Amino acid sequence: MLIVEADMNVQGRLTIVGTVRLEGRFDGTLVCSRLEIGTDGYLMGEVVTGELIVAGQIVGRAQARHIHLTASAIVEGELRHEQLQMDAEAVLVGESRRHPRLEMPTEFLALEARARHAEDDFRKLETESRVRRAEEALNAKAQFAALRARFPARRVPV
């Protein structure tokens, strides 16, 4: 999870696989898996995400499969979505368009595939490491048993 803190101001284009929590200000284009805009969060520009939860403010364009505008949300611009949930107190100045199927940008999908591949590689290495440690423990146990057999325990007279 990437968190843009309340005292931060980020500008530019950001593509990230994962969740972004926006408590500060972001100016530009943001592409991510999930975006949570806190009550003090402000986004000016464009966002493309799978899930968007807004408690703060957006000025610009937002595209997401699922959008939830909470009671404190203010959106000025255009929303494109498959599903929209809007609390009664939320403010939308602009337009909302429902699309039956929204796609993420190809650059994001490629990054997501690379991240998934890296995660699979990590899991594979982790499993191999566990197997290797288990084999080493079994070998150590066998060596200890062999040493014990070579040097039987001696009884010390009391």
Image (tube, rainbow, N blue to C red):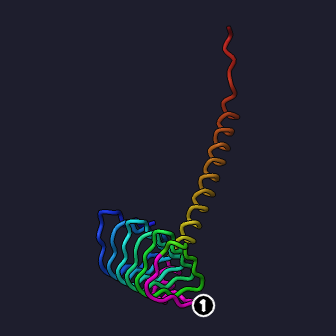
Q: Is residue 20 visible?
A: no
Q: Is residue 3 left or right of residue 137?
A: left
Residue at the image point whose x is 50% and y is 72% from the top: 89
Residue most extreme to the top: 158
Residue occupying the point 59% across, 52% down? 133
In the image, residue 139 sits, relative to residue 76, either above or below, namely: above
**Which residue is found at the position 32% from the left and 79% from the top?**
27
- Figure disc tally: 1
The kind of secondary structure element at disc 1 is loop
- The residue pinned by badge 1 equals 101
Could you tell me if residue 134 is visible in this image?
yes
23 relative to 105, above or below: above
Of residues 88 and 36, which is closer to you in this image?
88
Q: What range of the chain is rendered magenta?
A: 91-114
Q: Give the amino acid type for the residue marked by disc 1 in the picture.
A: Arg
55, above or below 104, in the image: above
Magenta span contains residue 90 = no
Quadrant hosting residue 25: bottom left
Between 10 and 110, which is closer to the camera in this rendering?
10
Residue 52 in the image, given as x and y percentages of width and height: 50, 76
Quadrant for the C terminus in the image: top right
Q: Would residue 56 appear left or right of 67 to someone viewing this image?
A: left
> Picture coordinates of residue 155 (x, y %)?
69, 17
Could you say which is closer to the camera, residue 78 or residue 140?
78
Q: Residue at x 54, y 67 (%)?
A: 122
User: Is 72 placed left or right of 132 in the picture?
Assistant: left
Callout 1: 10 Å neighbours few (<14), some, many (20+)? Answer: few
Is 129 positioned to the left or the right of 18 in the image? right
In the depicted structure, whether residue 35 falls above or below residue 77:
above
